[in-house]
Structures are given as structure tokens and as C-alpha cells.
Amino acid sequence: MSTSRDGYGHWQRIPTRWADNDVYGHVNNVVHYAFMDTVINTWLIAAGLDIQAGQEIGLCVESHCNYRASVSFPDALDAGLRVGHLGRSSVRYEVGFFLEGSDDVVAEGHFVHVFVDRTTRKPVEIPAGLRAAMEGLVVV
């Protein structure tokens, strides 16, 4: 993973909400997973994935997050997205979270999607248009 903003090709700002804080006064760990899911799926939809009627869908088969610093409401996060590995039917997205305007990473994680047929749930090749968009985010 990259702890530098230079390591990511797509950015999305994520505001925290009052409800994201837990009893310890910081954004709860499970919220970071929801943020990763949101960044990835927002990008996928913009890249052409039809989440309502497309034949191919991406299922999360692995996720992980390392926490480096605390975040609390009303902080806003800049989420950087990149592709760490692109296979035939799977992709590993890597997400770095930075406090708005800061160069210090506060959390970094990954999601692995396997693309499957919506009906059979059998693995399929990543659709060509989506693969081309993902190639633009591949880490060199």
C-alpha cells in the first residue's frame, strides 16, 4: 500500500457523520469498510457497471484495513483509489484515507472483488469496458 497521495489515481471526498463516531469518540472501524465500499462502488458505477441489471456483478471475497490515526466527526476524508492487482475475473482495489488536505494516511485497506454471473454466481471475465477503466488505476 502507498502512504503517499501520489500512489492513487482516483479521489473522492467523504464527509464523516455524527453517527460515525463510536462511544470512544472516533469513527468506528466498521465505518471505514463502508467508506471503502462506497468509494469502490461509486467508481465502478461511473466506469459503467450496471448494478441494477448488468449480467456481471462484483462480489467482495476479501477485505482488510489498517488504522494509523484516529478520525472523528466532523473530519472529512480524501479517499484515494487504485488497483493493486487485476486478474481475469478478480480485482484487488486499494484505498488510502487521508484527512482532508493532509498528506498523512490515517487508514489504508483493500477489497477483492470476484466478478460473477448475476444468476449462476459462477466467475466470469471482467467486462472489457470495465477492465479498460481498471487498467487506468493499476499500480505500476
Image (cartoon, rainbow, N blue to C red):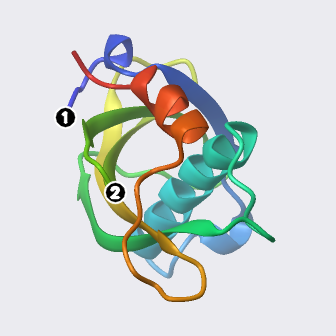
Q: Residue at x 24, y 26 (%)?
A: 3
Q: Secondary structure at mark 1?
A: loop
| Sequence-first disc among 2 and 1 | 1
Picture coordinates of residue 46 (x, y %)?
Answer: 74, 39
Q: Residue at x 46, y 61 (%)?
A: 32
Q: Is residue 52 visible?
A: yes
Figure check: 32 above or below 88:
below
Nearer to us: label 2 or label 1: 2
Figure check: 22 above or below 4:
below
The part of the image, by quadrant, that contains residue 85 is top left
Picture coordinates of residue 59 (x, y %)?
Answer: 45, 73
Side (left or right) of 15 relative to 97:
right
Q: Is residue 27 visible?
A: no
Picture coordinates of residue 89 (x, y %)?
Answer: 34, 57
Judging by the rendered image, the residue that carries numbered circle 2 is: 89
Figure check: 129 above or below 17:
above
| Quarter of the C terminus within the rendering | top left
The part of the image, by quadrant, that contains residue 24 is bottom left
Q: Residue at x 40, y 22 (%)?
A: 8
Picture coordinates of residue 95 (x, y %)?
Answer: 39, 42
Q: Is label 2 in contact with label 1 (beta carbons under 8 Å)?
A: no
Query: Which residue ends up furthest to the right in the rendered image?
Result: 52
The part of the image, by quadrant, that contains residue 124 is bottom left
Q: Residue at x 53, y 47 (%)?
A: 127
Question: In whole angstroms, how far apart are the C-alphas of marks 2 and 1?
Answer: 22 Å
Judging by the rendered image, the residue that carries numbered circle 1 is: 1
Query: In this orientation, which residue lies closer to the viewer: 125 or 15?
Result: 125
